[in-house]
Amino acid sequence: MADAKRIVFLGPPNSGKGTQAVRLAAALGIPAISTGEMLRSAVAAGTPLGHRVSDVMDRGELVSDDLMAEVVKARLAEDDAKVGFLLDGYPRTLPQVETLDSILESIGASIDHVVMIDAPEPVLVERALGRGRKDDTEDVVKIRLEEYRSKTEPLVGHYRGLGLLREIDGHQSMDAVQQAILDAVKDQ
Ligand code: AMP
């Protein structure tokens, strides 16, 4: 597992990937970087970034690739990301894949694993509505899923083609999902 240091988490909203990202990052001693969390903190703190993204996020749509590139470039340049990182929620579009590739290329690094957690759509919707977050009304849940299917799902084939994809069944207990992920990224 020594070299499993740069990991991307892919998956639809409410696949459980946020929880699993934090657990795996802790196990590997690398920072879990959730772009969704970063943006939510920016909104909560009322920063200029927060003001720019809050309406788009409330609608369940994706923030622009250019703005996300700025956010991610700055975050990956921080000291703690030198030992590696787990990116949860980025990249989410094919242009974002290119941005990440160019950031990694500039530091002579590459992605070790892309962990894809999925679950049947009715399970995702039920979990979303059970969560009761401000942005989780039924319409917004639908839009978030549509954004995922149209813009993010194409990344699955891309990373599969590169031999980086590790597919995990997210419709199991949290501990079972965690074990499946650990197995998938060990002894790469
Ligand atoms: P998440 O918690 O990952 O579901 O992200 C919450 C929201 O933040 C998303 O619905 C988007 O509006 C925005 N967001 C997070 N990451 C990205 C990204 N990589 N590209 C575009 N928008 C993002």
Image (tube, helix red, strand yellow):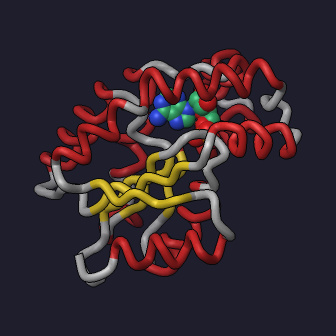
* Residue under the point 55% across and 73% down: 178
- Please tell me which residue lies in front, 58 or 14: 14
Quarter of the image with the C terminus in it: bottom left
Quarter of the image for the N terminus: give it.
bottom left
Q: Quadrant of residue 78?
A: bottom left
| Quadrant in the picture for residue 121 | top right
Task: State the image coordinates of residue 19 (x, y, percent, origin top left).
Answer: 64, 62
- Give the total number of marks visible in the rendering: 0
| Residue drawn at the location 36% of the way across and 72% of the way down | 184
Could you say where residue 38 lies in the image, as x and y percent from the top left?
59, 43
Q: Which residue is at the front of the view, 136 or 101? A: 136
Is 30 rendered above or below residue 108? below
Relative image position of residue 30 (x, y in whole percent) = 43, 71
Q: Is residue 184 visible?
A: yes
Viewer-proximal residue, 162 or 103?
Answer: 162
The answer to whether residue 70 is seen in the rendering is: no
Q: In this view, does 82 lie above or below 179?
A: above
**Identity of the residue drawn at 42% across and 60% down:** 86
Above/below status of 95 relative to 59:
below
Q: Which quarter of the rendered image does ligand 1 occupy?
A: top right
Residue at (42%, 31%) from the top-left corner? 152
- 103 horizontally vs 137: left or right: left
- Asked whether, in this view, residue 26 is left or right of residue 8, the answer is right
Where residue 54 appears, as percent x and y from the top left, is 69, 22
145, 83: nearer the viewer: 145
